[in-house]
């Protein structure tokens, strides 16, 4: 008998099971695309992570414009897929890291993506940005890590210098061992208003070990500059800004176990520095002070102290030491009017180091005395302010006397001499013009004129006399140019004499002498016989010379010289033998030249 009650229960169970399967199938076929925020509220110094997550793969992802935020990382894409109890789970996401640009409430608008041919949109969400807050470590991004491990510092040697006292600014980039820097680019170079500035070149960037706020860091010196404040009071040094590419470890490792890094760009700045410049004290300031600040030596020197009139000498006013050597004026010489003085020539030998300017500056005067006598160069005073002692100092040069030995006397000296040594007695008479000479006995001065003189006619006839000489010279030159064989012989003789001359210079040096001698002999034959005799044997040379009707004795002497040149390579030869061979070569060439 059928139990209808059991059948009813079984049917109910089957219905519930089928409904569940249909619901699971329907749920697995649903497409989801949503936006997830790391936090709905954050401080302006925090970072916001935005994930766009979908459960099906899609194309043509389009993010929102993120108004009120700056994208500092992203988009980064991640995919995960798994099977659990026979059910496939799939997830794909696009992630962004955002930095707020202002405080307030902002809306992150919809993003879109195409999945299965249909377009899906995420829901917009609101985010509130508040004032800066402390960031927990577990929420730090790559940019946060770079903030804490990268610092640009401007180190100033002195924050309260005197006016025109040197200070040094060194810009150092401190990098923690936890990160690395792959590149940097200056964004804003400082302008040093109210300062005289000089950059000190950094030859190479080399990392050095150091500390920053008590922690170990590496640092690189990027820029060095020496400044001289030109104004008292509070002066600002504008900051140096850099765009730095930083590699930050992520805590993850790749397939081979190597640490993975995230790269980010970070803008760092050295910050404004204020320098309090003290004015120079007015108490006890010398009247001749002209702005020199430092530690100096002063001297006035002359190239000579005794000379004749119309000769010249050089007087040098020189300041040397450490300080603002380029920023003050040298004292000027004050000389007697009888000395002619030219404009001074300024010379500067100054180098700028981290300690400031060092070296010397000078004015060199050229002085020419016109009259005989003794002329003093008065002493000069040079005053400067020493910032180390906080006091003024005055240096005084010695007086120099210039003794002009020979030359005319000045007008004043002549007048004095006439008064003392050339007085005439005046005899009273009725003639008031007793001292006027009425008969001067003057003679006429002759003049000679070039026109019509003997020299005039000689110069006039010179071109006519040169014409026949030029004609003769031209014919002789044409004849020589037409004598092709003769020209070759002359060139060969000249070449032979050249090599004999070279051999003569090498007398006493066996190897060099016989090499030059052998070359001279072969070149002589080359010119005379029109062949390359250096490639022939001595028998062939003997045959050629015999065909040219050269005397056998001369041929034998020539061959003997060639044998001596070869034997000299392996046997010792005395200076006497070398001289004899040289004389014999000159004699043989002379004899052969007559027979060829």
Image (spheres, grey):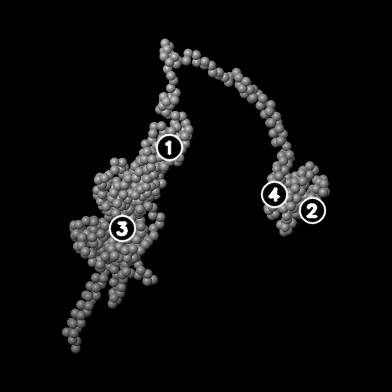
Residue furthest top in the image:
430
Q: Earlier in the sequence, mark 2 or mark 4?
A: 4
Q: Which residue is mark 2?
A: 539
Which label lies toward us, 3 or 4? Answer: 4
Secondary structure at badge 3 equals strand
Q: Check disc 1: other Cα within 10 Å, few if <14, some if 14-19, many if 20+.
A: some
Please name the residue shown 43% across and 19% down the image: 425
- Residue 503's label in the rendered image is 4
Q: Check disc 2: other Cα within 10 Å, few if <14, some if 14-19, many if 20+.
A: few
Which label lies toward us, 1 or 4? Answer: 1
Give above or below for 33 relative to 320.
Answer: below
- Position of the C terminus, as image quadrant, is top right
- Residue 402's label in the rendered image is 1
Residue 305 visible to an observer of this rendering: yes
- Label 2 with label 4: CB-CB less than 8 Å: no
Distance CA(mark 2)–CA(mark 3): 90 Å
Q: Earlier in the sequence, mark 3 or mark 4?
A: 3
Q: Earlier in the sequence, mark 2 or mark 3?
A: 3
Q: Which residue is mark 3?
A: 152
């Amino acid at each position: 008998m059928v139990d209808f009650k059991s059948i009813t229960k079984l049917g109910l169970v089957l219905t519930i099971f089928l409904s569940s399967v249909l619901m699971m199938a329907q749920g697995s076929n649903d497409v989801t695309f949503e936006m997830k925020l790391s936090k709905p509220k954050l401080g302006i110094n925090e970072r916001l992570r935005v994930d766009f997550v979908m459960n099906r793969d899609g194309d043509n992802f389009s993010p929102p414009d993120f108004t009120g935020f700056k994208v500092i990382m992203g988009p980064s894409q991640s995919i995960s897929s798994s099977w659990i109890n026979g059910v496939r789970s799939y997830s794909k996401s696009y992630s962004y890291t955002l930095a707020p640009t202002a405080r307030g409430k902002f809306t992150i608008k919809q993003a879109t993506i195409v999945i299965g041919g249909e377009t899906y949109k995420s829901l917009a969400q609101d985010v509130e940005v508040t004032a800066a807050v402390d960031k927990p470590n577990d929420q730090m991004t790559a940019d946060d890590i770079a903030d804490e491990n990268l610092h640009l510092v401007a180190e100033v040697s002195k924050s309260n210098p005197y006016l025109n006292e040197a200070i040094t600014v060194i810009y150092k980039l401190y990098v923690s061992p936890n990160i690395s820097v792959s590149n940097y680019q200056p964004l804003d170079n400082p302008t040093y208003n109210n300062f005289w500035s000089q950059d000190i070149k950094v030859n190479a960037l080399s990392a050095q070990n150091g500390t920053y706020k008590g922690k170990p860091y590496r640092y690189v010196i990027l820029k060095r500059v020496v400044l001289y404040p030109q104004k008292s009071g509070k002066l600002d040094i504008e900051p140096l800004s850099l765009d730095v590419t930083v590699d930050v470890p992520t805590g993850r490792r790749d397939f081979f176990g190597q640490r993975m890094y995230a790269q980010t760009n970070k803008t760092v700045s050295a910050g404004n520095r204020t320098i309090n410049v003290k004015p120079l004290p007015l108490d006890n300031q010398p009247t001749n002070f002209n702005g020199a600040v430092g530690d100096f030596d002063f001297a006035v020197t002359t190239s000579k102290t005794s000379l004749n009139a119309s000769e010249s000498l050089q007087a040098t006013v020189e300041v040397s030491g450490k300080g603002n050597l380029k920023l003050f004026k040298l004292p000027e010489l004050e000389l007697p009017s009888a000395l002619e003085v030219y404009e001074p020539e300024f010379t500067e030998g100054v180098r700028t180091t981290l300690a400031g300017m060092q070296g010397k500056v000078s004015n060199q005067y050229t002085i020419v005395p016109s009259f005989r006598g003794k002329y003093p160069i008065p002493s000069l005073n040079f005053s400067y302010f020493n910032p180390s002692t906080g006091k003024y100092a005055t240096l005084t040069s010695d007086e120099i006397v210039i003794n002009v030995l020979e030359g005319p006397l000045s007008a004043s000296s002549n007048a004095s001499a006439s008064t003392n040594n050339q007085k005439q007695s005046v005899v009273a008479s009725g003639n008031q013009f007793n001292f006027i000479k009425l008969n001067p006995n003057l003679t006429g001065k002759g003049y000679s004129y070039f026109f019509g003189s003997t020299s005039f006619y000689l110069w006039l006839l010179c071109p006519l006399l040169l014409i026949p000489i030029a004609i003769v010279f031209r014919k002789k030159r044409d004849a020589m140019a037409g004598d092709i064989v003769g020209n070759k012989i002359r060139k060969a003789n000249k070449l032979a004499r050249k090599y004999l001359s070279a051999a003569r210079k090498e007398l006493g040096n066996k190897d060099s002498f016989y090499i030059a001698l052998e070359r001279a002999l072969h070149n002589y034959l080359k010119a005379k016989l029109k062949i390359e005799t250096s490639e022939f044997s001595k028998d062939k040379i003997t045959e050629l010379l015999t065909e040219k009707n050269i005397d056998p004795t001369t041929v034998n002497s020539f061959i003997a010289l060639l044998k001596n040149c070869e034997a000299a390579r392996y046997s010792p030869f005395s200076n006497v033998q070398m001289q004899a061979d040289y004389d014999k070569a000159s004699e043989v060439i002379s004899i052969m030249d007559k027979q060829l």
